Amino acid sequence: MTRVIRGQTLSFGVSPGEVRHEAKGAIVIGDDGCILWAGPASLLPQGFRPAPVDDYGDCIVMPGFVDAHIHFPQCRMLAAPGKDLLDWLSRFTFPEESRYADGGYAAAMAQLFLDRLAAHGTTSAMAFCSVHKACAEALFAAAVSRNMALVTGKTMMDRNAIPAVQDDPETGARESAELYRTWHGKGRLRYAVTPRFAVTSSEAQLRVSGELLQSLDGVLMQTHLSESPGEIALVRELFPSARDYTDVYDRFGLLGPHSFFAHGIHLSEAECARLSESGSTVVHCPTSNNFLGSGLMRMAYLREARRPVHVGLATDVGGGTTYSMLATLGETYKVQMLTGYKPSALELFRMATMGNAERLRLSDTGAIEVGWHADLVVLDPCATPVLASRHELSSSLEDVLFALMILGDDRAVRATYVAGRKLHERVTQ
Ligand code: GUN
Ligand code: ZN
């Protein structure tokens, strides 16, 4: 049924400076979950006026968040205290991921995971699964039943981990291709070739990953790059002939506009130049980097005009300490301040919606556009007593968004719509 959503509407255009903001806006959603009309409520066409209305008053109705890097099988293991990345992976992460061999467990967790995303205002994500095909099957099935635009893939890892989370190059390639054929393009789903990182994939596995990326039409690729000093030293030992960490992936054809590299904290000038030239994206995961003590990712350095590298933003749950993209924007702000760069709230909100969606080639989400899916989050700038009193001092949209990203989390998410369906509504006492 056609439905009208009213509130303070906010969206970002295709060009970075374009901000569309209506203090009293309306969005009309059609039967198919797509946006039929959007604009000032006073101009709502007559024909839509009898439609049922969800009126959110002064709350902000904006595109749902797009999380560009998150681990589904880590959905229960936030706050596992490792000494550093490699210790955290072997002590907590691999044992937890081994449970996802069980399709029943994975299916139950997929519901919990997607419910959590909705509760935090995230409507799309690029997610890692575990090494097990059943894990990816469970997440794809849960996402398609919600008509969610989700990018995921079976992790490939054939060394330096417990046997329960290892595959081999042939099995990894065959299962990835099978999953791609079953799920890629079904509803709003996309497949991502997913070699975990150079530490856990042999040369043979990186080679087949490159072959999959070249041969599967429209596929994406996700991995990790240059996250922690211990990891970088180990990659140097494992690939002594590579020029640097980025070159390990480059040699196997893994760089390009469809490729996503989480972290990218300690990149050299030469690595940035190759990432830039190839059109690759580095995904900044600030809560994870702070939690694991990995280092400060320098967004301004990555984007230097002579060789700009695309940057996305993500939670990286369970290395990341929150599902909230709002809190992640707040942490991005603080990390960037420590590196000498002061991002605006508008810039970060754009990155977390339209910016991430564009990089992920999700062509019908990330903005409020007629014909696109209604993937929306409703944010309450007065959700908590602290936010409410801060809101009284706000004098501009930038200021309202700034307070939300510094002080907000799931409590500020009043409702979340995916493809026009309300999947979450905050229960207030
Ligand atoms: N590098 C390889 N695997 C992982 C992971 O699961 N989390 C993080 N943060 N880094 C990784
Ligand atoms: Zn990760």
Image (cartoon, rainbow, N blue to C red):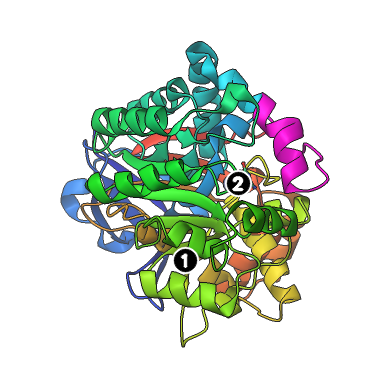
Residue placed most toward the observer, 374 or 390: 374
Residue type at numbered disc 1: Arg
Residue 404 visible, this angle: no
Outermost residue toward the bottom? 306
Residue 91 included in the magenta stretch of the image: yes
Residue 49 % position (x, y): 24, 47
Q: Which mark is residue 360?
A: none
Instruction: Tell me if 309 is positioned left or right of 15 in this view.
Output: right
Residue 23 % position (x, y): 45, 65
At a point 41% along the width and 39% down the height, the residue shown is 152
Can you say whether 123 is above or below 161 in the image? below
Instruction: Tell me if 19 is positioned left or right of 384 in this view.
Output: left
Sequence order check, earlier mark of 2 and 1:
2
Cβ of mark 2 under 8 Å from ligand 1: the answer is yes
| Tag nearer the camera, 2 or 1 | 2
Q: Which mark is residue 350?
A: 1
Q: Secondary structure at mark 2?
A: loop
Q: Secondary structure at mark 1?
A: helix
Magenta extent? 77-95
Instruction: Tell me if 307 is positioned left or right of 50 in this view.
Output: right
User: Which residue has dot 2 on it?
Assistant: 199
Outermost residue toward the left? 47
